[in-house]
Image (tube, rainbow, N blue to C red):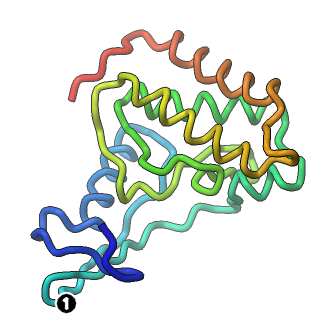
Amino acid sequence: GKLLADRYLWLGESRVRSFREWDLLQLMHQQGLPVPIPVAGRYVRHGFSYSADLITVRLPDVEPLSVIFSRGQVSAQLWSQIGACIARFHLAGFCHADLNAHNVQISGDNTVYLLDWDRGDRRVPASWCNSNLARLHHSLNKLSAGGTLPLHDWQRVINGYMDTWQASPDTAVHL
């Protein structure tokens, strides 16, 4: 966990956050999932703590979902694409530890990307998938006027998610 602003408890090189995120991003990219491609990572020891950095290829022309949502520019189709994108990650067993409207990025051509995988991991799909979606829903509710995302918008996310899940020929993840 965090000790100071950008320092973490040193538990060995195999536990360095930037390296773990690098490995996860590489694996997801190899599987064709929409994530930034890692370029360089490092850590600097500070006694019993360390700081870490990760550099990725810049995604072209992206904005956070939170910004697009605040402008009222999320179409019905984009809501569905967001759900479908998340389902692709879940089907492959990738759990985003902080799935929120800031970490969902949308490109100019409406490609959906998921960023910030430093605490993510890979596991067999289970109830965590629902918790992951609930986290995003909570984030969107916080950004909504009146504190509640319109039900029809969230239903579009869920429909896109379920359509992708049901269209998958093999929902079993082999880790």
Name the image quarter holding residue 102: bottom right
* Residue beneath the point at 24% across and 80% down: 43
Q: Quadrant of the C terminus?
A: top left
* Residue that badge 1 annotates: 46
For disc 1, the neighbor class at 10 Å (few under 14, some 14 to 19, many from 20) is few
Q: Secondary structure at mark 1?
A: strand
Q: Is residue 74 left or right of residue 56?
A: right
The x, y position of residue 64, in whole percent, is 68, 57
Which is more toward the observer, 136 or 39?
Answer: 136
User: In percent of the image, x 37 and y 59: which residue is there?
Assistant: 118
User: From the viewer's perspective, is 61 left or right of 124?
Assistant: right
Q: Is residue 108 above or below residue 151?
A: below
Give the residue type at disc 1. Answer: His
Q: Percent from the top left, x then y, of residue 158?
A: 65, 23
Q: Nearer the viewer, residue 52 or 8?
A: 8
Picture residue at 34% right of the left edge, 31% below the top: 93
- Quadrant location of the N terminus? bottom left
Q: Nearer the viewer, residue 47 or 29?
A: 47
- Determine whether 96 is above or below 17 in the image: above
Q: Quadrant of residue 82?
A: top right
Residue 31 screen position, x and y as percent: 37, 37
Image-based side of 44 in relation to 112, left or right: left
